Image (tube, rainbow, N blue to C red):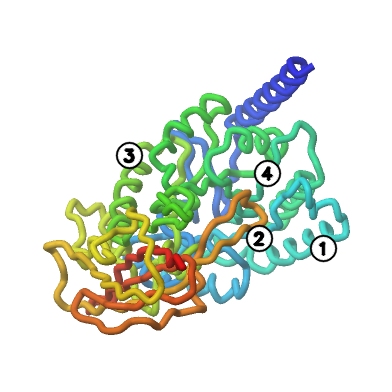
Amino acid sequence: MRKQFFIIISLVAFIVLLCGFFFTVNYRGKKNIDKTKTVYIDKTDNGFQLYRNGSPFYIRGASGDANFKVLSSINGNTIRLYDTLNLSNVLDEAERYGLAVIADIPLPKYDRQFNLYLNETNNTLLKQKIKALVKTHKNHPALLMWNLGNELSYPFVFWKNDFIKTFNDLIDIIHQEDPNHPICTAIAGVSRKVIASINMHSPQIDLLSFNIFGNTKNFSTNIEQISTLFGSRPYYISEWGSDGPWECRYTSWYAPIEPTSVKKAEQIRTRYKIITENKDEACLGSLVFYWGNKLEYTYTWYSFYLNNYKSEIIKELESLWSNSNTEPSLIGLDYMLLDGKGAMDNIILAPNELISSEIIFSKNKKDSIRIKWEIFPDVWYQSKYETKYTMGVDHKKTVNSFQHFENNKAVFITPETEGPYRIFAYIYDENGYFATTNTPFYVLNNK
């Protein structure tokens, strides 16, 4: 019985993959592209080419919502927005600095157990809302394309379900209302099943985008495998950057160890070169993550901006986007130690213990710097879409236990309450840039 079930499942998967292949071949064969459109994708002898206002356009920019002027000044040309709040003003701001906008249209994620798309009344309201949104903004000169949903958990199924039917209706509505701008959807990683299912059930979507981080090193191999199965299809990388919390090392109490900003800058440089040197004929560009301030595990993990200061990672991006052969001059941070121990040492301390924290700098340390220290408790949580508990910083509960500061050192007393904590150091220079590092530690009461 089990063998028969496996054969049936394998046959269904094969049919889905085969259908996906034929749909993509059909996509590749599309002709008679309307070149009067504001934005369109054409299949050329050298692969796919994105055109904007009649000229070739390669996506180079960031996903986020912060300083558009700076993004433009370091040779970025595109910003991806994650919501539609105040979209008119944001589009105007992007146009002011010559940036193209990929506008996300947020959609509820598909969940087989709690399928919100089973409610037809909600689906109708969603369609009406999105139609009105597109109608309002479709003629704005800064608009590049629409992104219909982010990491929606598009299901791998043989028959269209309520989610897919609604998703396809939305694609058709947007195409009818705005034929001048392509539509894509963002996928978490590079999933053969998701791509096969989209190719089979939603072939009318114009392109795909991929959110990748540490997996950048495997991206070209994954895309080559996908192209072999389905043929080339236009795409861009909608999120890439340094290691995410799920990709890093953890302490024994499952606290993610965040890379220093210097390490992140190194990863950014390496991964951008991988993207540019290994891009195939279907790649339309890439967006780094996150151009703004974002709380995810910590405020420093992804944020390129803190307290009106810019991350030194922006210097790295400026160097990369200007094709400079010289590495930028960074603040000089190396790492942090607590009484001579690093984050990898699983630092467990007693309550009310006097501890010395120290920032180690490289030989290239800048002299005109200012260091700010903070301690916060870590908290365990479990989100709807995660199967195991993870940790994040409770930034609302500052631990005020510092005794004194001296140059690159700070002395503090460990909290009385048992549990996980994290000490942060923010290093600011006179030019408006910051570097960051933090170390998790655990207070254990042995009484």
> Could you tell me the amino acid type at mark 4?
Tyr
Q: Residue at x 51, y 72 (%)?
A: 394
- Residue 171 is left or right of residue 69, and the answer is right
x, y (%) of residue 179?
66, 53
Q: Earlier in the sequence, mark 2 or mark 3?
A: 2
Q: Secondary structure at mark 1?
A: helix
Residue situated in front as seen by the camera: 372 or 129: 372
Q: Which residue is mark 4?
A: 154
| CB atoms of marks 2 and 3 within 8 Å | no
Indicate whether 238 appears above or below 218: below
Vertical comparison of 390 with 34: above or below: below
Q: Residue at x 17, y 54 (%)?
A: 326
Q: Circle 1 sits on which residue?
A: 125
Q: In which quarter of the view is residue 45 placed? A: top left
Question: Disc 1 residue type?
Answer: Leu
10 Å neighbourhood of mark 1: few (<14), some, or many (≥20)? few
21 to 329, vertically: above or below: above
- Mark 2 lies on residue: 106
Quadrant position of residue 440: bottom left
Residue that badge 3 annotates: 277
Number of other residues with Cα within 10 Å of mark 3, as a class: few under 14, some 14 to 19, many 20 or more: few
Q: Amino acid at mark 3?
A: Glu
Look at 49% across and 63% down and name the residue there.
297
Q: Position of residue 425 (x, y in %)?
A: 32, 72
The amino acid on which the numbered mark 2 sits, given as a three-letter code, is Pro
Q: CA distance from mark 4 to mark 1?
A: 21 Å
Q: CA distance from mark 1 to mark 2?
A: 14 Å
Earlier residue among tags 4 and 3: 4
